Amino acid sequence: MPYTPIAATLGYVLSHDGREVLLIHRNARPDDQHLGKYNGLGGKLESGEDIAAGMRREIFEEAGIQCEQVQLRGTINWPGFGKQGEDWLGFVFLITRYSGTAFTENHEGSLEWLPLDRLHEVPMWEGDREFLPMVFDDNPQPFHGVMPYKGGRLVSWSYSRG
């Protein structure tokens, strides 16, 4: 059977001083599978859209800011992650330069600037804690991981760099 994951972007916007990251606190929709969790910004790619353009569009739609510099930090294959067990393939970006003022909320929840050294304090998907250090590290090599989920729980995590 062919593997046909949902292709998506996931972006982390750094503050101008590089000390904080813009996250969404998914607290607006009771039916949200991410309810209560903090997450990066992003979403599904549109037909005919390249990965970087999709990331820029999603950040603009969700936060109201224009991405001026995006870096692909890695890719993650999330088998079984979707609400109905769908497979996802994510392209993870770090946005190091942007213009505009970020929204304080959108239809999915509130947008918050959190200090990088406090990310461990907020609720998020358990798998995010595995790859987030690589999003913000100084290693120029992208990471490529596989992070299966079953029943909303992380099963395992493996990755390579380069």
Image (cartoon, rainbow, N blue to C red):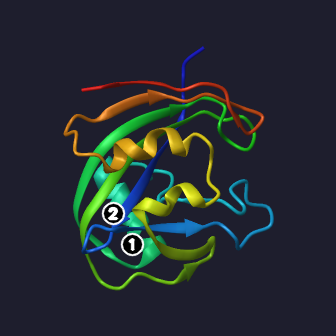
How far apart are the alpha carbons under marks 2 and 1? 6 Å
Q: Is mark 2 on a helix, strand or loop?
A: helix
The residue located at (41%, 61%) in the rendering is 116
Residue 30 in the image: x percent, y percent?
Answer: 80, 67
Residue 108 shows in this picture: yes
Camera-side residue: 26 or 123?
123
Residue 41 in the image: x percent, y percent?
Answer: 47, 61
Residue 27 in the image: x percent, y percent?
Answer: 70, 71
Quadrant of residue 18 within the rendered picture: bottom left
Camera-side residue: 115 or 71?
115
Q: In this view, does 37 lie to the left or right of 130?
A: right
126 relative to 37, above or below: above
Q: Is residue 143 left or right of residue 38?
A: left
92 relative to 88, above or below: below
Residue 60 badge: 1
- Name the amino acid, label 2: Arg
Q: Is mark 1 on a helix, strand or loop?
A: helix
Residue 125 in the image: x percent, y percent?
Answer: 62, 47
Residue identified by numbered label 2:
56
CB atoms of marks 2 and 1 within 8 Å: yes
The residue located at (30%, 44%) in the rendering is 73
Camera-side residue: 42 or 96?
96
The residue located at (63%, 70%) in the rendering is 108
